Image (cartoon, grey):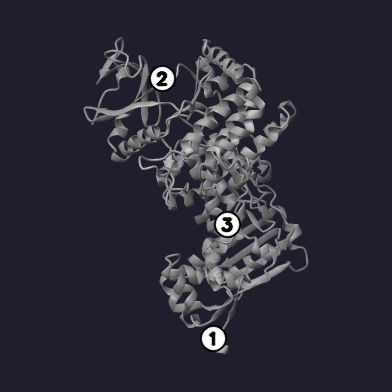
Amino acid sequence: MSRQPPHRVKGKPLRFGRYVLDHRIAVGGSSEVYLARPVNGSWPASRLVIKRLLPGVLENPHNVGTFAMEARLHRAAQHPNVVEVYEAGSVDGEPYLAMEYVDGVDAYRLMRRAQNENHPIPPSVAMFMAHEVCSALACVHTAVDDTGHPLAVVHRDVTPSNIYLSWDGAVKLGDFGIARLLSPESSSANTHPLKGKYAYLSPEQVAGEDFDHRADLFSLAVVLSELLINQPLFPGSGQLAVLLAIRDGRIDALYDHADRLPAGLMSVLERGLARAPSDRFRTAEQFRSALEPFILHDMDGCRQALGQAVKWARNTASSWKACVDPNAQRIPHRFEELAAMVRTRQGETWGPSSLAKLIEWTTTGRLEAHDEVDLHGEGFEQVAAIPELARHIPPSTTTTTQLHDPGAPDYRGDLPQTSMLSVLVDMLAHRETGVLFAERTQPSGLFTRKEIYLAQAKVIHVASTDKKELFGEYLVRRGLIQREELDLALAVLPRYDGRLGDTLIALNLVDAVQIFRAIRDQGRDRITEIFTWTSGAITFYRGVAPSRVEFPLDLELAPLMLAGLCLSQPEETWLEQHQHQMDDLLVGVAEIPETMRLAAWPPEVLKVVGAAGDGRSQGDIIGSLIAARLINVPSALRAIEVACAAGLLKRISARSN
């Protein structure tokens, strides 16, 4: 169904069913919003908002269903602090929502005006706004269906542009377009595309973990913090930097302003911004109660002050300009192809070469730190002195002297006599910090080297000389981009300082959260691929740190063990390979070292350990878990292998009895 949007009809309003659309006031990724009025009378309001799907979106039944879900959620969450939906209907088969019009500005516009004019919002006004949004979320999170069954709604987009402020100081939460009803199948950020403004996502959403209503409370705490400090809470040079700051819980900007905040407020904000959902307020009511002591004595005064702030934000000719991000990068229509020259320490000269090719050579070790490159035609410099290339130097090359002085490494093993599983277990048990080298030469003569950097038994960085494991190739292999899109990004790479992720985001080829997670997943996959090696050497050097890490991976070792075993042999061979162990007795170990007991073991491992108890046969354990539909046979066998290797279970062979 195609249609011409009403805003193209200049000079006159447009009739739309029982309403007249005066003009379009906003447009988003899937819908457009019009200021409207009834054709006759003033029901349901003399002025209201009509929300319609965009023409292209309307063709997709899924989008129409999402629109209907938004209407359902609004009907279930009726509250003075939630934008009211008067009706959901259709005109000539086109769905629409008739909604309350909040005459004023949104919080985004208020915050931009305050930041651009260096005129902070009074703390009492900021806390009043957050208090009112808490009231809205308390209603949203506890909404029930027609039968009284809890809907478990998560808004997922508690951001300044969805907080509406009126002339008289009313605060209303709107836009349920990406809200979701949570279920065990839908509570993971990986289940559906993650949406929302990146700077307001919770750490668990960024990491792709399960989330619930406490993600909304984190988002609101970010909004409140930015109102109080009059600047972004998670600043960064790009979207990836912002997401990394959120994941790591870096709220330095808030601490820098701690002495200007009302006494006791910092502890409220710290709880709202806690990395772990379990450390946050349990409910929106709790968050609201924590704010009340700061404003309860003068709620009317706060409301009046907010009304004045709304008038100040709206009555300025420059306010719309203030809403435009002056730092937004425009994609160049044309670019100059880089033609760099290389001069190696052996006296060889290569080139001309593109920046993408130089990065590939640097990453895979063909181009070394002391080789020289003439990048911009201004003379040769060492690779280590060129920022666009230096960040791609394998970290070990900066510590070669330290690593290869006479003397043995702290740990050495040969594959497959020493399994990668046992190596990771050893690293975890001793909470190691240092670098693991995995090296092999294939029959074709191809040499591969991987470097796994650990900090307190967490993986912070993984480097690889394998060209197939370059980030662009990884994205193509996963289907996140097409080969042609990678070629385009590599062509304009110099415009973005050689950062492929930032380039793809700027070109709108990949979502920033997808890039963020792909970097993490690439690190995981580089490690788990070693489980498939049939030859090679593993060495460990304690206390060695990478020279530079722009994106610390923060990967737990325990899940890597299970993921590696998944790759080590085909799914269908697990039962055949381990059939002879089905009568073995598996006993839970009573005294487990704290390091191993508190590790982030995958659910499958915890299930088999719990099922073993004081001792059961492997076959009985697997049978009981399958009967309860908790696990399948290959997953159970892998989990048992991990649990035994880690010392969580003790195996007593039936053959020894």
Q: Which residue is mark 1?
A: 654
x 78%, y 66%: residue: 406
x 40%, y 46%: residue: 482
**N-terminal label among 2 and 1:** 2
* Farthest residue, direction right: 406
* Farthest residue, direction bottom: 657
**N-terminal label among 1 and 3:** 3
Apparent side of residue 189 relative to residue 539 in the rendered image (left or right): left
Apparent side of residue 474 relative to residue 223 in the rendered image (left or right): left
Work out which quarter of the rendered image holds the N terminus and state it. Answer: top left
The reply to whether dot 2 and dot 1 touch (C-beta < 8 Å) is no
> Which is nearer the eye, 61 or 482?
61
Q: Which residue is mark 2?
A: 101
Q: Secondary structure at mark 2?
A: loop
Q: Residues within 10 Å of mark 3 (few under 14, many from 20)?
A: many
Which mark's residue is nearer the viewer, 2 or 3?
2
Q: Amino acid at mark 2?
A: Tyr
Q: Secondary structure at mark 3?
A: loop
> Which is nearer the eye, 54 or 120?
120
x 54%, y 41%: residue: 215
Which mark's residue is nearer the viewer, 2 or 1?
2
Q: Position of residue 354 (x, y in %)?
A: 53, 42
**N-terminal label among 2 and 3:** 2
Q: Which mark is residue 465?
A: 3
Q: Residues within 10 Å of mark 1 (few under 14, many from 20)?
A: few
> Which is nearer the eye, 66 or 527?
66
